[in-house]
DNA sequence: TTAATTTGCGTAAACGTTTACGCAAAAGCT
DNA sequence: AGCTTTTGCGTAAACGTTTACGCAAATTAA
């Protein structure tokens, strides 16, 4: 009972290992009567194949890996759910690992997944993922990247960060703001930090507003979490010149903003407008419901896992690479005010 | 380069497989000079042991499993982080799986982890975990349960739910409330739903307030998420008698309450006090900062993983079971008002 | 010095599968 | 009927490790 292997089945059925394997894997070259007999014995004894043995022999397991940057960021929740759903439907296990913004950890985990012979990997990379491509190709492990820097020759799902940021900042400008700060996540060169900065600058330029270094502040570390937004905002407020609006890299940072502003006695949106990015589940429930740029996260996950399984099922590693780019959408709530009544407000 | 196994090392070093294995695993019965030579060859060629082969041979891998009920509930974030940290320190991989409130899925995943020969499992069980104990013991896989029903003979980490609920409701009573509703998660018999109900009733009893069926509402499904709290609150408000305070099973349900109350034009805390449970990261940032019962989640994770590794390292499956029970703590914010000025408010 | 122990290593089996190859019997074809 | 193909199955190697056992040489003990 504790251990019940194909040898046991073979012994009971009076056949060889090969025959049992054929029966269990729906392979041809076996008569229906023996097949049924074997399947019956297997199910009666609660046989379960040993995934390690199977993986060793096949060189591939029924697992797929998902590498996220921060599993505690609600941003990833819908993505994880979408991938999980499809993986379960396909009879695969999902291994979720958390690089925590560390590229060393990311590399370690990816290598570990490869050594564990996963059938495919979805990675939301910390830094440039191109360095993995060669190795993964050699090992014939399909991979899909989430939000990768452009230019990588691989399947990927991304979101138009420039457009998203452009839309958010343009909205602020339309509301009359001209002193708009951007709180970026620590490392500017990381995707999508750089793209959002680009969108921010582009929106300013379109309206003839000069870019002001003093309105550009970076969080200390790279985590993109509440506390960092809080610290960055305090720094921004002590910068001498005060903006009338803040565009934050993401919703968590925006939450930190709100906290700092409240502490300093500044009302949102009256004294300061705030816009975030991501539209995490909690954004509408905040002290000041957050205007933010919605990323269709669930869809991102759905597409990524779809692309992945297409590769897995076809076995083709060198077909044309598909780069899907989804459009974000501005969701207007309280935190940016609404002097402009033409804009559509989200119903509450 | 793609594949580099101990056979390759053995060939290069001119020794046998056994010797290579001894060197790589720091086993005795090998001279320092051969050991060093082998290690040098291994590292020079970037040797990585195949975890499937190793697992198959050893009957155990370097993975531990963590089964959570809802990976998207921020409640689990600190727990995952704590377990992840320790696992990494110990050189183990953490496999996080998500049962999504389904006991069928839970069972499937636990079996899958067992078949994958993990070294240990931490489970936040959907239902009574006692049925797993026999199998896990037979397979010699240590397990630690999070928030299990009492009475199970196993290592576990729990929180005093009765006390937590009692404290929360007592606080409401002290504030003058006598009509206090409880929004429970769907299935009452599930732990910790039942415990929190117990605490609620106990608090009422202590103050001589009769339990009113009309103030007890259950969410439709068992997910314990925002939407459910929202629906349950609407139902509660249409019940004829209106409470002056709501104690919600958890913070997400409480968020749903806030949404429903707002929609109905009821001000929190003036028209209705609301108290949650868990103190998720976002509780202080809500439209009305949420009074809630804090669970030391990170500590729960730390202790669970500590207990698990003690079992793994000692190999003792039948030592005394340890049941740790942590104390929750009431965190008072805006959502319950503060007529009673004796109470300590959390500084903002 | 001799006997007992320890050290250093090799051989081969084991972990539980899959799969290439081979071969007799059955089935299909002319 | 004789030839070719297909069917049904078995044998054994392979996947990449670990480990029980054995044995000669070196070391220690008496």
Image (cartoon, coloured by chain):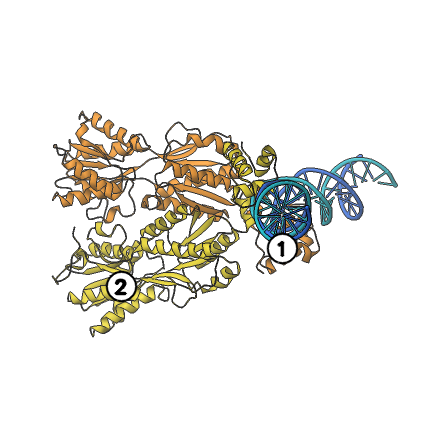
Chain colours: A yellow, B orange, C cyan, D blue
The chain letter for the residue carrying disc 1 is B
The chain letter for the residue carrying disc 2 is A
| Quarter where residue B294 is shown | top left
Q: Secondary structure at mark 2?
A: helix
Q: Nearer the viewer, residue A58 or B232?
A: A58
B229 left or right of B241 in image? right
| Quarter where residue A224 is shown | bottom left
Q: What percent of the width, then of the height, locates residue B52?
A: 55, 47
Q: What percent of the width, then of the height, locates residue B117?
A: 52, 41
Q: Nearer the viewer, residue A87 or B1?
A: A87
* CA neighbours of label 1 inside 10 A, class few (<14), some (14 to 19), many (20+): some
Q: Nearer the viewer, residue D27 or B78?
A: B78
Q: What percent of the width, then of the height, locates residue B301?
A: 40, 42
Q: Secondary structure at mark 1?
A: helix
The label nearer to you, 1 versus 2, is 2
The residue that appears at 16% across and 67% down in the rendered structure is A174
Return the mark for residue A164: 2
Pick the quarter of the image with the N terminus of chain B.
bottom right
A252 left or right of A16 in image? left
| Quarter where residue B162 is shown | top left
Separation of disc 1 and disc 2 at Cα? 52 Å
B195 left or right of B52 in image? left
Q: Is residue C22 above or below residue A295?
A: above
Return the mark for residue A95: none
Return the mark for residue B39: 1
The residue that appears at 15% across and 65% down in the rendered structure is A175
Q: Is residue B332 visible?
A: no
Q: What percent of the width, then of the height, locates residue A288?
A: 19, 53
* CA neighbours of label 2 inside 10 A, class few (<14), some (14 to 19), many (20+): many
Q: Is residue A57 visible?
A: yes
């Amino acid at each position: 009972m504790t251990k019940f292997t194909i040898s046991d089945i073979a012994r009971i059925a009076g056949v060889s290992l090969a025959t049992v394997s054929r029966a269990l894997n729906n392979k041809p070259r076996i008569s229906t009567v023996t097949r049924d007999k074997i399947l019956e014995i297997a199910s009666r004894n609660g046989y379960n194949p040993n995934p390690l043995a199977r993986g060793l022999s096949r060189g591939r397991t029924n697992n797929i890996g998902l590498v996220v940057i921060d599993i505690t960021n609600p941003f990833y929740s819908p993505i994880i759910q979408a991938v999980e759903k499809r993986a379960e439907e396909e009879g695969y296990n999902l291994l979720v690992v958390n690089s925590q913004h560390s590229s060393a950890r990311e590399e370690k985990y990816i290598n570990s997944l490869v050594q564990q012979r996963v059938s495919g990997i979805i990675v939301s990379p910390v830094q440039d993922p191109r360095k993995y491509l060669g190795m993964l190709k050699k090992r014939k492990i399909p991979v899909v990247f989430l939000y990768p820097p452009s230019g990588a020759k691989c399947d990927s799902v991304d979101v138009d960060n420039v457009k998203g940021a452009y839309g958010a900042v343009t909205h602020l400008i339309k509301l009359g703001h001209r002193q708009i700060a951007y709180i970026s996540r620590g490392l500017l060169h990381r995707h999508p930090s750089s793209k959002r900065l680009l969108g921010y600058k582009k929106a300013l330029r379109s309206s003839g507003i000069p870019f002001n270094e003093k309105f550009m502040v970076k969080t200390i570390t790279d985590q993109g979490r509440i506390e960092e937004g809080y610290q960055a905002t305090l720094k921004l407020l002590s910068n001498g010149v005060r903006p009338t609006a803040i565009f934050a890299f993401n919703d968590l940072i925006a939450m930190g903003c709100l906290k700092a502003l409240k502490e300093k006695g500044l009302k949102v949106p009256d004294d300061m407008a705030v816009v975030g990015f991501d539209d995490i589940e909690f954004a509408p429930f905040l002290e000041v419901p957050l205007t933010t740029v919605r990323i269709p996260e669930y869809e991102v996950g759905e597409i990524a896992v779809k692309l992945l399984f297409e590769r897995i099922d076809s076995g083709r590693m060198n077909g044309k690479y598909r780069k899907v780019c989804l459009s974000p959408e501005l969701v207007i709530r309280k935190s940016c005010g609404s002097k402009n009544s033409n804009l559509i407000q989200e119903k509450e």
